Amino acid sequence: MTPSAAGPAVRATPPAPAATSGPTGDRAPAALLRRVRAATGWPSASLELVEHLLPTSLGALALERGSAVHLPDAAALPALATNPWVDGRLARTRAVACAPVTGDDGEVVAVLLARDGAPHPPCAAREEALADLADLASGVVAAARRDRALHGLSAAVAAADERLALAEIGLADRHDLLEGVLETVDVGIVVLDAGGRVQVVNPRARAWAGLPAGLDATGAARAATTALFADAQGTVLSAVRGPLLSALADGATTEQQVSWASPGGEVVTGVCRARPLLSGGERTGAVASLTDVTAERAARAELERSNAELESFAAVAAHDLRSPLTVVDGYLELLEEEAAERGDALAAGWSATARRGAGRMASLLEALLAHAAAGSARPPRLEPVPAGPLVEAVLADLAVPGGASVQVLGTDLPVLVGDPVHLHQLLTNLVGNALKFTRPGTPARVEVAVLESPSAWELRVVDHGPGVPADQRSAVFRAFDRGAHTARPAGGPAGHGLGLATAQRVAARHGGRIVLEDTPGGGLTARVQLPRP
C-alpha cells in the first residue's frame, strides 16, 4: 500500500492530544490508547483531532486517503524519508498504522495512530484490531468534545455569575450613593412613575410636605401619592402637582417659581424644575426638583432697595452740591480778577488754583449724576437715534484737541434704537477716553464706526494709545477704579474712574455689553454690542 506524499513540512511540534478536562476527557482517551498499544505491541499511540492535525503528522496519511494506512517501513518511502517524525528530528519512526475516526455524520473527526521505531511486516489481525478501536474512538472523541463544551459553558456561566455579582455590588454602591445624596441634599426631590404614583420623596420634600419623619420610604411614597392628588392649594405637593403631571403627560420641561406654606406656617418661595424621565425614547415617569430661594430673593430685594437708595442719594447730593459750588466758583472768579487788577500775583494764583479745584469737583458731580442716571431701574426710553448725527454731536461736545484726529468710518451710518441721551453719554465717554489716553509725544488718532447686523448694532471706537493690559480690562469698568496700568491722560489730570463704568451701565440697560480688545499695532478697541429690539 503506497501512501500519497505528505504536505510540506512546517514548524515541527508534536500533534496535540485529544485530552480535555473532566473525567471522560482524562480517562477515556488514555484507556483507548492503552488498548491500541496492547493490540499492536508498539510503544507509541495517539489520538489526533482533525482540527489539531499538522501537515507533517503521519496521521495526515489516513486523512488524505479517507481510509486506514499501514506502512511496514516509512523510511523506505522517498515521500516520507525526510518527514521529521521519520528522519529523527522529532522521532525515528519505521512502522506506521493509522485509521480515520468518523463521527455520527460520517465526517472524519480524528485519526488513531500507532508507531514503532522498528519495521513490521503487514498483519491482518493488527489491522482489524486498529479498525475496531477506531470505531470505539468515535464515541471517545464525541464524549471528550461534549465534556469540553460543557466545561466551556460552565466557565462561561461562572464568568457571567461573577460579572453579575460585580454588577450587583456596583448597583448596590450606586444605590447607597444615591440614597446618601437624596438624604443630604438641600433640594426637594419628587419622582413619579408612569402611572403617576410617587416613587421618591426625599427628606427635604417630606419635611416641607409635613409627612411624619417616622415613615419609611415606601410609606412616605404611598402617603405622598395620596397627598399629591388630594392636597389643597398652598402645600408643597400642590405646588409641584401641575409641573409634574405636565411633564408626565406631555413631556414638557418647565422651570417656574412656586410658593407653599411650610408645616410651621412660613411661606416658602422656591424654583420648581420638572422634566420627564425617559427610557428607550419612552416616558417612564417625571421628576421635580425644588430649590428654596426665599432667603435669596429677600436678600436680592434688599440689595436692590439699598442700591436704589444709594443711587438716589448720590444723584440728590450731586445735584444739591452744584448750586453752592457755582456760587463758590463765582466768588473765586471775582477774587482772581480783583487780585489781577491790584497786581497781586500771589492772590491771583491762589484764586486760580482754588477755581481749578472747584472745576474738578463740578466735573465729578456731573459724572456722579450721569452714573446714577445710567443705573436707573426704569427701562430706557427707546426711540430711533440716527448714528450719523449722534457721532457729530459727540465730537462737537468733546472739542477734539489740536493735532488729534477722529475719523468716522463709513458714510451711510444706520439708525439705532435706544435712549438718545444715554447713547450720547456712552459714546462721549468712549471717544473721550480714546482722545485722552495717548502715547507720549504722539497726537491721538481715533476711528469710530457703527455697524449693523440682522440681530444687533455694534459701536466701535478704536485708538492707538498705550492700551490696557488684558488682566486689567475688567477692573476699568468698576466705579472709581482707574486701573493699575501705567496709561495716563497726556497733558491732563486722571479722570474720575466713572466713564467706562457709566458706559457699561448704559450698554447693560440696553441689553448689551462692552468688549475691550487690542488694536492691531497697539492701542485699545472698544466694541459696544447692542441687540436690536
Image (spheres, rainbow, N blue to C red):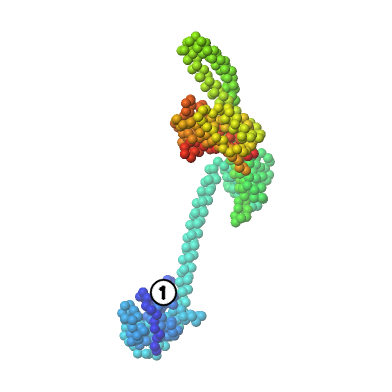
Residue 482, x across and y down, in percent: 49, 29
Q: Nearer the viewer, residue 164 or 416?
A: 416
Residue found 31% across the figure and 79% down from its top: 88
Q: Nearer the viewer, residue 43 or 457?
A: 457
Residue found 42% across the figure and 85% down from its top: 68
Q: Nearer the viewer, residue 69 or 75?
A: 75
In this rendering, position of residue 215 left or right of residue 63: right
Question: Which element is circle 1 on?
Answer: loop
Tell me the kind of residue under disc 1.
Ala
* Quarter location, residue 46: bottom left
Q: Quadrant of the N terminus?
A: bottom left
Q: Residue furthest top?
A: 342
Q: Quadrant of the C terminus?
A: top right
In this rendering, position of residue 88 left or right of residue 299: left
* Quarter location, residue 319: top right
Residue found 39% across the figure and 88% down from its top: 2
Residue 294, x across and y down, in percent: 59, 35
* Quarter location, residue 227: top right
Q: Is residue 278 above or below residue 472?
A: below
Residue 308, x across and y down, in percent: 59, 28
Residue 278 visible to the viewer: yes
